[in-house]
């Protein structure tokens, strides 16, 4: 799990124990933690793959000129 998700769950636990966070907000926080935990790695992989492909296309042009 990513640190952001763990921190979110810690604050959720504290807020729920103190009564500051209601049930719908608890559900929203849990969904956010799950989505960011599972969706961030594939999107980052795609982002870094595209930047590597762009770098490969730019480097040979720099060597010629």
Image: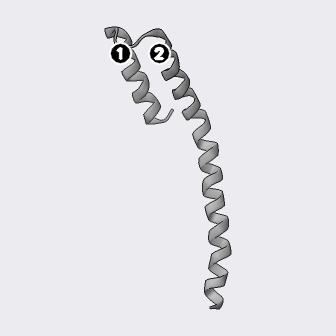
Mark 1 — residue?
15
When the figure is inspected, residue 23 is found, relative to residue 36, above or below; the finding is above
- Among numbered discs 1 and 2, the one appearing first in the sequence: 1
Real-space CA distance between mark 1 and mark 2, rounded to the nearest whole angstrom: 9 Å
Q: Secondary structure at mark 1?
A: helix
Q: Quadrant of residue 59?
A: bottom right
In percent of width and height, residue 37 lies at 55, 33
In percent of width and height, residue 47 lies at 61, 54
How many numbered markers are drawn?
2
In percent of width and height, residue 13 lies at 39, 16
Q: Residue at x 58, y 30 (%)?
A: 35
When the figure is inspected, residue 11 is found, relative to residue 40, above or below; the finding is above
Q: Residue at x 43, y 35 (%)?
A: 3
Q: Residue at x 43, y 28 (%)?
A: 6
In percent of width and height, residue 11 lies at 37, 22
Horizontal placement of 16 versus 45: left or right?
A: left
Q: Residue at x 65, y 58 (%)?
A: 49
Question: Which label belongs to residue 26?
Answer: 2
**Image quarter (top left, top right, bottom left or bottom right) of the C terminus:** bottom right
Question: Which label belongs to residue 25?
Answer: none
Q: Residue furthest bottom?
A: 65
Horizontal placement of 49 versus 28: left or right?
A: right
Q: Secondary structure at mark 2?
A: helix
Q: Are marks 1 and 2 in contact (CB under 8 Å)?
A: yes
Horizontal placement of 21 versus 28: left or right?
A: left
Judge the density around disc 1: few (<14), some (14-19), many (≥20) Cα neighbours within 10 Å.
some
The image's colour scheme reads one colour
């Amino acid at each position: 799990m990513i640190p952001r998700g763990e921190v979110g769950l810690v604050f959720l636990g504290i807020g729920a124990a103190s009564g500051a966070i209601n049930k719908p907000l608890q559900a929203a926080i849990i969904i956010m933690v799950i989505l960011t935990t599972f969706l961030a790695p594939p999107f980052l992989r795609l982002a870094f793959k595209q930047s590597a492909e762009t770098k490969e296309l730019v480097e040979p042009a720099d060597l010629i000129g």
